[in-house]
């Protein structure tokens, strides 16, 4: 009982000590100040980096816009990591934790963890080479495995791709084995036009060629004049002709839709039929009646 009373008395003396509360108050204020300063420094650094890239974009010698967006995001992330890491060390120092010993211990622990964190190291190395080799950049439309969409962010460890339906794919860079980048070179719009077998194929070809000549300069997305390649396939009920047009990167979707509409309107105007599905109904009763009637006529 005496030991409990002694502990309680020690606790009361500790709690009632004004110097301890003043020290705790100063420590709390230091921590709040460090956090506020870190937030301001991060925001200020990101703004400075953004302004630097804006100035570089107006210079006569600058890298592509795609690469600038990627480097901008990467530098902003690196600044955030560094500043917040320093802020954490400052907070630990403010609460009287030996930071130098912690750093030395973290180095030894990091060496031990490094042997088991091979995937993390692989992700970082792969992310570095993705950025260094400019395999794809922020804003590019790419396909990586099952993910296809616009690159939202490239980090040293992960990449974020947003599909056109809104899903955000986040995956480690080490899993990037094959990338299809649709945004580097010009695209090709492919339009297949079906013509009925009853139509004059040569006339249809001449009409399509003449019409495609009129489209030159109509769409700024089209790099070269649309071209009729010829008959692509012979279907069950139609002859399929293929039209192609070279467009700017990722403009082929819009151009293909526009060409389909224009070609459909033109074929309707000149009277060339685009085939539609036909269904033949066969009635056994009606066939039997016709057969019996035929037999009766032959018997007479």
Image: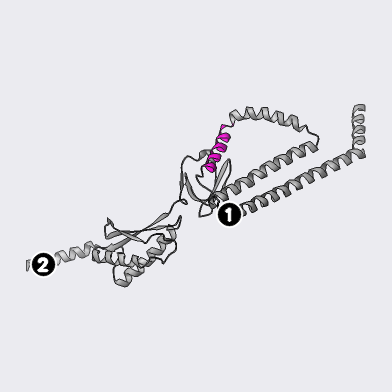
Vertical placement of residue 157 versus 48, above or below: above
Q: Is residue 5 left or right of residue 189?
A: right
Magenta stretch in the rendered image? 117-133
Residue 76 - label: none
Name, please, the residue furthest toward the left: 300
Q: Which type of secondary structure does the marked residue at label 1 adopt?
A: loop
Between residue 47 and residue 202, name the one nearer to us: 47
Q: Is residue 205 left or right of residue 151?
A: left
Q: Which residue carries the number 2 mark?
A: 296
How many other residues sit within 10 Å of disc 2, few (<14), some (14-19) or many (≥20)? few
C-beta proximity under 8 Å, tags 2 and 1:
no
Quadrant assignment, res 16: top right
Q: Which type of secondary structure does the marked residue at label 2 adopt?
A: helix
x then y, percent, for residue 23: 87, 39
Q: Which residue carries the number 1 mark?
A: 59
x then y, percent, for residue 220: 44, 63
Characterize the magenta stretch by its predominant secondary structure.
helix
Disc count in the image?
Answer: 2
Mark in front: 2 vs 1: 1
Q: Is residue 109 magenta?
A: no
- How far apart are the alpha carbons under marks 2 and 1? 96 Å
Vertical placement of residue 149 versus 270, above or below: above
Q: Earlier in the sequence, mark 2 or mark 1?
A: 1
- Which residue corresponds to the image point at 57% horizontal and 38% vertical from the top-left? 124
x then y, percent, for residue 120: 58, 35
Asked if one can make out residue 151 in the rendered structure from this viewpoint, the answer is: no
- Which residue corresponds to the image point at 64% horizontal and 51% vertical from the top-left? 52
Vertical placement of residue 12 versus 2, above or below: below
Quadrant of the drawing holding the C terminus: bottom left
Between residue 154 and residue 148, name the one nearer to us: 154
x then y, percent, for residue 250: 46, 55
């Amino acid at each position: 009982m005496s030991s409990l009373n002694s502990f309680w008395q020690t606790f009361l003396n500790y709690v009632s000590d004004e110097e301890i509360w003043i020290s705790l108050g100063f420590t709390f204020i230091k921590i709040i100040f460090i956090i506020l300063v870190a937030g301001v420094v991060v925001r200020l650094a990101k703004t400075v980096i953004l302004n630097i890239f804006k100035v570089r974009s107006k210079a006569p010698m600058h890298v592509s816009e795609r690469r600038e967006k990627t480097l901008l995001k990467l530098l902003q992330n690196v600044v955030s990591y560094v500043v917040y890491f320093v802020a954490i060390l400052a907070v630990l120092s403010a609460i009287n934790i030996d930071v130098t010993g912690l750093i030395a211990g973290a180095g030894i622990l990091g060496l031990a963890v490094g042997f088991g964190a091979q995937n993390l190291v692989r992700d970082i190395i792969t992310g570095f080479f993705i950025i260094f080799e400019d395999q794809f950049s922020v804003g590019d439309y790419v396909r990586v495995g099952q993910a296809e969409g616009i690159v939202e962010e490239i980090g040293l460890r992960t990449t974020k791709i947003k599909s056109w339906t809104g899903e955000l794919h986040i995956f480690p860079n080490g899993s990037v084995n094959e990338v299809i980048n649709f945004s580097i070179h010009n695209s090709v719009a492919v339009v297949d036009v079906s013509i009925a077998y009853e139509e004059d194929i040569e006339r249809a070809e001449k009409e399509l060629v003449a019409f495609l000549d009129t489209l030159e300069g109509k769409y700024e997305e089209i790099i070269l004049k649309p071209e009729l390649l010829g008959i692509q396939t012979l279907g069950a009920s139609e002859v399929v002709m293929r039209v192609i047009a070279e467009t700017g990167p990722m403009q082929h979707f819009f151009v293909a839709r526009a060409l389909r509409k224009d070609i459909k309107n033109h074929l309707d105007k000149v009277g060339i039929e685009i085939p539609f599905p036909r269904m033949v109904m066969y009635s056994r009763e009606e066939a039997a009646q016709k057969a019996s009637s035929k037999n009766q006529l032959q018997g007479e």
